[in-house]
Image (spheres, grey):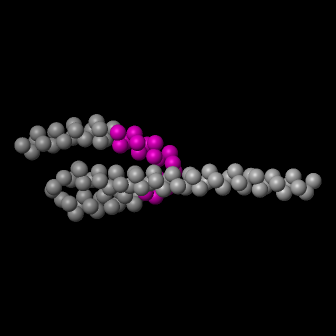
Amino acid sequence: MGKPAGMKPQQQQQKKTTPIHNIQFFTCVKALFASLHFSTLPLFIFQLRNWTLAILVGGGAMFFFLFSALCSSLFFIYFIFVYFTLYLWRAPLFYSVLFFFRH
């Protein structure tokens, strides 16, 4: 009776510890990926007008999205959606309107 009761917590601990380490590793990778791309976003918006504001907003966005991506992995799915819609669809439209009014 004592042996099965002692083996069950060990098997449950081995099953629980390995996915937790994998989840923590992937959330760190996701957070770094999200923070790098969101920190470069204001540099594209404020192109050559105000670099100090772009760096400050980029640093704030980097820390904000770093901690939010560490807190929830569902944010990464939202980040991919925003990344593809903003960079691949909105950014060329934004640049074309911006350069049209500049020149």
How far across and down, in percent of the image, does residue 48 sit?
A: 16, 55
Residue occupying the point 40% across, 39% down: 81
Q: Nearer the viewer, residue 72 or 40?
A: 40
Residue occupying the point 57% across, 52% down: 22
Q: Is residue 47 above or below residue 101?
A: below
Q: Is residue 89 above or below residue 36?
A: above
Q: Is residue 50 left or right of residue 60?
A: left
Residue occupying the point 19% across, 52% down: 47
Residue 41 colored in magenta in the image: no
Residue occupying the point 35% across, 60% down: 60
Q: Characterize the magenta stretch by its predominant secondary structure.
A: helix
How far across and down, in percent of the image, does residue 5 sit?
A: 86, 54
The answer to whether one can see residue 65 in this image is no
Residue 70 colored in magenta in the image: yes
How far across and down, in percent of the image, does residue 89 sit?
A: 28, 36
Magenta span: 65-84
